Amino acid sequence: MHRPLSGEREPQRRTALLPGSLAAGLSSLLLLLCASCSSGLSQPPWNQPPPDTTAPRLQVSGIGQAQEISANTPVTCLATDEHGKVLRILVTIDGGTVLDESYDSAQAAAAFSLAWLPEFAGPHQLVLSAVDDSGNSNLLVLDYSIAAQ
């Protein structure tokens, strides 16, 4: 250990005090952490997952765009949501509503499907739309035709 020479002062130990604004900021941060823990959040607010901005995925099997199919070909519409639940489904054929279903979040599912057998020959249009529990929506329009028998 260094001993002061004559005329030198003994070094003083100091306790660093935080400036008022920094201390207030740390106090606010601690309050925020305590509030997030007591409010039931499992993670601090800055560590929450980002909001869901992905629209539901829509698929149709049995027909494709501009495809001609035979009558009574099974067609299935599928709506899925990767990050949540599908809350509303709307299916129309040639402008007429085939299905319009809304679900509350307790009844909603991550997937929904509808199957039917188209029967009238000629050109048709299928419109499928879905909305998820984050308000994201998607629309799929297929023009197809059914061959005359």
Image: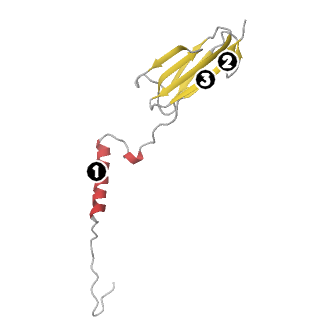
Q: Residue at x 31, y 57 (%)?
A: 25
Q: Position of residue 126 (x, y in %)?
A: 60, 18
Which amino acid, by three-letter code, is at mark 2? Tyr
Query: What's under tag 3, amino acid-wise?
Result: Val
Q: Quadrant of residue 67?
A: top right
Q: Quadrant of the C terminus?
A: top right
Q: Which residue is outermost to the top?
A: 149
Spatial CA span between label 3 and label 1? 51 Å
Within-10-Å neighbours for mark 3: few <14, some 14–19, many 20+: few
Q: Which residue is mark 3?
A: 141
Quadrant location of residue 138?
Answer: top right
- Residue 133, given in percent of the width and then of the height, sits at 44, 29
Comes first in the chain, label 1 or label 2: 1
Q: Residue placed farthest to the front in the image?
A: 95
Which of the two discs, 3 and 1, labels the residue nearer the N terminus?
Answer: 1
| SS label for mark 2 | strand
Between the C-alphas of marks 3 and 2, the distance is: 10 Å
* Residue 141 % position (x, y): 61, 23
Place residue 7 in its image quadrant.
bottom left
Residue 144: mark in rendering: 2
- Residue drawn at (53%, 27%), measured in percent from left and top? 80
Residue carrying label 1: 31
| Labelled pair 3, 2 in contact (Cβ < 8 Å) | no
Looking at the rendered structure, the kind of residue marked 1 is Leu
Please give the label number shown on residue 13: none
